[in-house]
C-alpha cells in the first residue's frame, strides 16, 4: 500500500537584508514543508506590503515612510547621511535655521549645547549652507540658497530618523527654479 505525504506545513520566515522574497518547498520525513520569506523594512522592521522601495546605494528594502529622496535617488537614511557628508548635529542645526529658528531656539529644541551650535553654524557658513547676518555674534545666521535647497532632504531625514522636535510641523513649499540645487556633491 502506498503512503501519502499529505502533511503540508507552511513556515513564514523573515527575509535577510536586501532579499525581497523567497519560497522553497522541502520534503522531510514528516511531510512537505513550504518555506515562505516575508519581507520586512530593513530600517524600521515593519512588514512590507505591495509598495516599498529599494535603496539605490545599499540595496536595503524600505517601507515608504523610511525613504529619503536625494539627487533623484531613493536612499536609506544611512546612505542619505553618507551622501550629504554632514553629521546629524550639522543637519539639525541646518534644519533649525531652515524652519526659522534662531540659535537659542535651535539649542533649546534640538538639545544642542550652545558652543556646539555656534561652532556648527560657523562650519555650515564655511560650506555656504548658511550666511552670517552682520554682525554674526549679535544677529546670528540665516540659511543660504544652497542651504535652502539642502534643507528639504535634511528635514525628511530627521523625520525618518524621528529626530525632528515634537511640535515642529514642516510644510514644504516648492523651491524657485533658479535656486542653486544641492545634490551630488559631498560636503565635509
Image: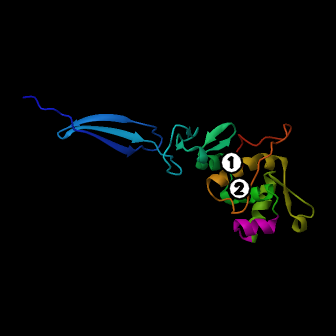
Q: Residue at x 80, y 58 (%)?
A: 97
Disc 2 is placed on an element classified as helix
Q: Residue at x 59, y 49 (%)?
A: 78
**Residue 188 can be seen in this image:** no
Task: Judge by depth and name the residue closer to the eye, 57 or 5.
Answer: 5
Q: Decide: marks 2, 1 in contact (CB < 8 A)?
A: yes
Q: Residue at x 80, y 69 (%)?
A: 104
Q: Position of residue 58 (x, y in %)?
A: 54, 41
Q: Where is 82 relative to 103, above or below?
A: above
Give the residue at the far left of this rendering: 1
Q: Residue at x 75, y 53 (%)?
A: 170
Apparent side of residue 141 relative to residue 13 in the rendered image (left or right): right
Give the residue at the far right of this rendering: 134
**Residue 32 can be seen in this image:** yes
Count the labels in the image: 2
Please tell me which of labels 2 and 1 falls first in the chain.
1
Q: Quadrant of the N terminus?
A: top left
Amino acid at each position: 500500500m502506498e503512503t501519502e505525504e499529505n502533511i503540508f506545513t507552511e513556515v513564514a520566515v523573515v527575509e535577510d537584508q536586501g532579499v525581497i522574497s523567497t519560497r522553497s518547498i522541502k520534503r522531510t520525513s514528516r511531510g512537505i514543508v513550504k518555506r515562505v520569506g516575508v519581507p520586512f523594512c530593513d530600517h524600521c522592521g515593519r512588514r512590507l506590503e505591495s509598495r516599498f522601495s529599494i535603496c539605490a546605494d545599499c540595496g536595503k528594502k524600505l517601507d515608504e515612510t523610511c525613504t529619503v529622496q536625494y539627487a533623484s535617488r531613493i536612499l536609506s537614511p544611512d546612505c542619505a547621511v553618507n551622501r550629504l557628508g554632514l553629521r546629524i548635529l550639522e543637519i539639525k542645526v541646518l534644519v533649525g535655521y531652515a524652519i526659522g529658528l534662531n540659535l537659542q531656539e535651535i539649542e533649546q529644541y534640538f538639545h544642542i549645547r550652545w558652543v556646539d551650535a555656534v561652532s556648527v553654524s560657523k562650519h555650515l557658513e564655511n560650506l555656504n549652507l548658511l550666511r552670517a547676518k552682520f554682525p554674526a555674534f549679535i544677529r546670528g545666521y540665516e540659511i543660504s540658497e544652497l542651504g535652502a535647497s539642502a534643507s528639504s532632504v535634511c528635514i525628511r531625514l530627521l523625520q525618518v530618523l524621528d529626530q525632528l522636535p515634537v511640535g515642529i510641523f514642516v510644510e514644504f513649499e516648492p523651491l524657485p527654479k533658479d535656486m542653486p540645487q544641492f545634490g551630488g556633491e559631498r560636503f565635509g
